[in-house]
């Protein structure tokens, strides 16, 4: 999991797996390639990372940039330490920032943006701003932007093209769940096309709103792919872009759902208070009962994580009640999978966090049994939750069995996050290596 950012230089260094001495060595190598000499040592890196010294912009910073593969133009344009990872702030809401947020997320060059993330405080502030900023109405069609093509425009994009983009985007999002690798580039390319049309084309006003909604849905799907690969900074950037576009399109429930995804990421990174804060802003803005149920369920997980027993149980009750509420409106696509299986399994997870493990096992088993066959990744996650809980109970044989089932399924469907979850259990399993089931699992983990 990602470590808390202390300084942008430390963040970039640790993301590459470099020690302070290793970075210093790479800086000296960068100097040698330029026919120069550098006396940079690990002690100097330490002073830069603790703010006790600032590297010289003309001499040291270009060498640091070269060591990280960052364009020197960023050094000149942004200044220290803004060109380094960890300094970006979420963009304020408004029509003028929906497209730039997409552009930022889609940048794939090996520069500083590969390492950027947002602080927990910035994410909480983003949720607060989203809740208090009403979407601005579209006053005119999206204007062309100079530079898109020979005449500076994609021209008019008709409703037929918009419908095709929506249909093909929905197919990609559906397929990406269990075919991540083949769909990885296709999703990125589809979002890039939608972004270019929004930037350089002219759409009728209703179609422009639909395109922003599509951009939000695609960016959310990509964010989950990055999240599954444990690329948390990249995932946050795509969720940030998705939130901006859902807000621009006036899609309140979708925006709340995106905020709940960011909250889920915070839970994963052991930041339950931030998750609870984000969800506190998102829940009052949801309208569909299924969407509200999902957000309450994630809120319950956050409260369980900070030991708020009563508030956790209240949120679980609200989630169950909302899911059962009658409604004429179908659940939005982004939460249409929500079911009683999720209520049961996540309630079990909450109770495990609160120390009520016997009932937790019963509910997790119930949830796994109720899950639809198509939800393989969720099943693998829940099996790992079970393994974690059984280890706390001192039941390593049962834990190893659950973890083995999770590993086999996650390997079959290519779910790297689930595989990594099982790998994270290795230190807790190691003391029980004399047990046959545990030893076999540990051998599989070491061999893969």
Image (spheres, rainbow, N blue to C red):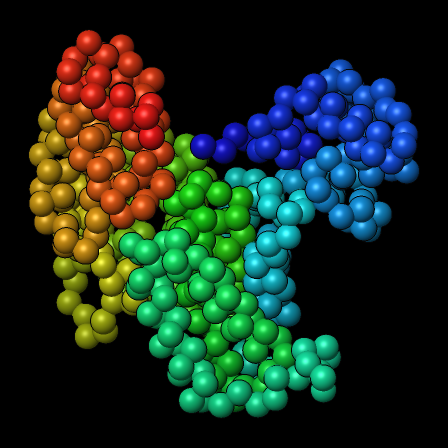
Depth order, front residue of 3/150: 150
Q: Looking at the image, is 229 positioned above or below residue 195? A: above
**How many marks do you count on the picture?**
0
Depth order, front residue of 433/300: 433
Residue 303 in view = no
Quarter holding residue 112? top right
Depth order, front residue of 154/314: 154
Q: Quadrant of the C terminus?
A: top left
**Residue 434 falls left or right of residue 130:** left
Quarter holding residue 13? top right
**Residue 305 falls left or right of residue 274:** left
Q: Position of residue 75 (x, y in %)?
A: 80, 45
At x 53%, y 60%, the residue is 241
At x 13%, y 24%, the residue is 398
Q: Quadrant of the N terminus?
A: top left
**Residue 210 falls left or right of residue 174:** right
Q: Position of residue 94 (x, y in %)?
A: 60, 67
Quarter holding residue 331? bottom left
Q: Position of residue 309 (x, y in %)?
A: 26, 32
């Amino acid at each position: 999991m990602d470590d808390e950012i202390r300084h942008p230089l430390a963040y970039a260094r640790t993301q590459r797996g470099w020690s302070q001495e290793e970075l210093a060595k790479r800086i000296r190598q960068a100097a040698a390639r330029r026919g120069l000499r550098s006396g940079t040592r690990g002690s100097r890196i330490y002073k830069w990372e603790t703010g006790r010294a600032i590297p010289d912009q003309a001499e040291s910073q270009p060498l640091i940039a070269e060591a990280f593969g960052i364009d020197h133009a960023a050094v000149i344009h942004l200044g220290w330490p803004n060109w380094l990872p960890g300094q970006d702030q979420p963009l304020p809401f408004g029509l003028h920032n929906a497209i730039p947020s997409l552009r930022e997320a889609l940048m794939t060059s090996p520069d500083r943006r590969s390492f950027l993330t947002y602080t927990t405080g910035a994410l909480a502030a983003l949720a607060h701003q989203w809740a208090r900023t009403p979407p601005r109405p579209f006053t005119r069609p999206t204007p062309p932007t100079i530079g898109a093509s020979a005449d500076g425009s994609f021209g008019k994009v008709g409703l037929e093209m918009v419908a095709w983009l929506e249909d093909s985007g929905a197919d990609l999002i559906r397929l990406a769940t269990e075919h991540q690798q083949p769909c990885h580039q296709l999703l990125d390319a589809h979002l890039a096309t939608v972004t270019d049309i929004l930037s350089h084309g002219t759409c009728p006003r209703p179609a422009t709103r639909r395109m922003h909604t599509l951009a939000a849905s695609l960016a959310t799907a990509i964010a989950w792919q990055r999240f599954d690969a444990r690329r948390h900074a990249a995932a946050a950037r795509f969720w940030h872009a998705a939130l901006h576009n859902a807000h621009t399109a006036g899609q309140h429930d979708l925006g709340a759902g995106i905020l709940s995804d960011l909250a889920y990421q915070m839970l994963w990174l052991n930041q339950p208070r931030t998750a609870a804060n984000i969800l506190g802003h998102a829940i009052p803005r949801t309208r569909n009962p299924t969407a509200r149920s999902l957000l309450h369920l994630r809120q319950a997980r956050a409260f369980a994580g900070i030991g708020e027993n009563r508030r956790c149980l209240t949120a679980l009750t609200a989630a169950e009640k909302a899911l059962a509420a009658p409604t004429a409106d179908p659940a939005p696509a982004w939460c249409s999978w929500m079911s009683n299986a999720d209520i049961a399994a996540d309630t079990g997870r909450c109770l495990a966090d609160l120390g009520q493990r016997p009932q937790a096992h019963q509910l997790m088993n119930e949830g796994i049994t109720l899950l639809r066959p198509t939800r393989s990744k969720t099943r693998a996650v829940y099996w790992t939750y079970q393994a974690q809980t059984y280890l706390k109970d001192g039941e390593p044989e049962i834990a190893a069995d659950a973890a083995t089932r999770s590993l086999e399924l996650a390997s079959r469907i290519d779910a790297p996050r689930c595989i990594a979850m099982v790998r994270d259990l290795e230190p807790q399993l190691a003391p029980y290596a004399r047990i046959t089931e545990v030893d076999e699992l540990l051998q599989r983990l070491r061999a893969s």
